[in-house]
Image (cartoon, helix red, strand yellow):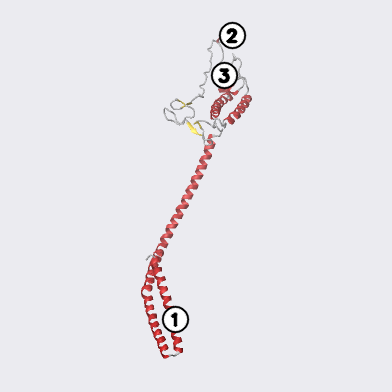
Amino acid sequence: MSNNYYETLQVKPDASPEDIQRAYDARNRVLRNLANHNDPQKRSEAEKERTVLELAFKTLKDPANRSAYNLSIGIGGNSGGLVDPTASGNILPFTSLLLGGTPQKTVVPSAPQFQRVDAWICSDCGTANEIKTRFCKKCAKVIGIVCPSCSAVISVDSIHCSACGADIKKTFKQRNEENRLAQEEEKARQAEALRIQRYQQELAARLGPIYEHGKHLTKWKSVATIFLSLIIYPVGILLFLHSFYHAFQIRSIAQTAGDSEYRSLANIIFTIGLILISILVFALCIGFISAMSSGY
């Protein structure tokens, strides 16, 4: 990778701004494609070359920076060629004498300090850090940020991401807006959940006495069932047994007397008594089982 910005852009020193722009666009498209290559080494090389390409383009597209850069590499003027001896700031001593003036010292503007492309310089302590470093190794100042579009680590003062070309400020603004909307939706969801919870608590408070009353009713229902099973049903059985006994006596008397009419009536009463006793015994069993299963 060349350190000469003209060689980096593959243009001549006397290239016009339009030629520089076209050369930058063409090379940038190639490097953007290489940034998505399957080979990690090629992606890394493409990102480094794009960093140098960006710096070269920013320097040469500005006339003042280009003039200073040309002087720093020994090229006169903005687009190459010889230095005009009569130009302001470039008057040589012997030229001044020929023009009838007093001897003057040659005024040559100092070359600017260009940004290093092999390291990230901390703006606080001036320490050179490795590229893709998030924090300065000396003062812990943030010198690298994560691109919100592709998650690549870029310089904190970058305008565009060198990996995906995204506008950093615009993308951060969009992400912040998305995060704000997501937080508002989450707050609304939590508020709705809290409202439902409070409603359920109020409903439970209102229905609590009714539920307790229902529990008491269930308890007394069990008590009543047991009472019927253990007291009323046996009494009924005794009464029917008593009736059954009298029916049996009538049946016996009818057989003794030899009256067929009374004997038939006694048999009917006897059969009905057996059926009623069976029903009562069955009801007693059902009631007792129901009382026990109610949990009393």
Whole-percent x, y for residue 146 in the image: 50, 34
* Alpha carbons under labels 2 and 1: distance apart: 158 Å
Q: Nearer the viewer, mark 2 or mark 3?
A: 3
Category of crowding for the residue at label 2, using alpha-carbon neighbours closer than 10 angstroms: few (below 14), some (14–19), many (at least 20): few
Q: Return the disc, 2 or 3, that comes first in the chain's sequence.
A: 3
Whole-percent x, y for residue 277 in the image: 41, 77
Q: Return the disc, 2 or 1, that comes first in the chain's sequence.
A: 2
Figure disc tally? 3
Residue 24 occupies quadrant:
top right
Q: Marks 1 and 3: CB-CB under 8 Å?
A: no
Above or below, comparing residue 34 to residue 76 in the picture:
below
Residue 49 occupies quadrant:
top right
Label of residue 70 in the image: 3
Residue nearer the viewer, 188 or 243? 243
Looking at the rendered structure, the kind of residue marked 3 is: Asn
Quadrant placement of the C terminus: bottom left
- The residue under label 1 is 271
Quadrant placement of the N terminus: top right
Q: Is residue 41 left or right of residue 140?
A: right
Q: Nearer the viewer, mark 1 or mark 3?
A: 1
- The residue under label 2 is 98
Q: Return the disc, 1 or 3, that comes first in the chain's sequence.
A: 3
Looking at the rendered structure, the kind of residue marked 1 is: Thr
Whole-percent x, y for residue 2 in the image: 56, 21
Category of crowding for the residue at label 1, using alpha-carbon neighbours closer than 10 angstroms: few (below 14), some (14–19), many (at least 20): few
Label of residue 196 in the image: none
Residue 97 occupies quadrant:
top right
SS at mark 3 in the image: helix
Residue nearer the viewer, 138 or 234? 234
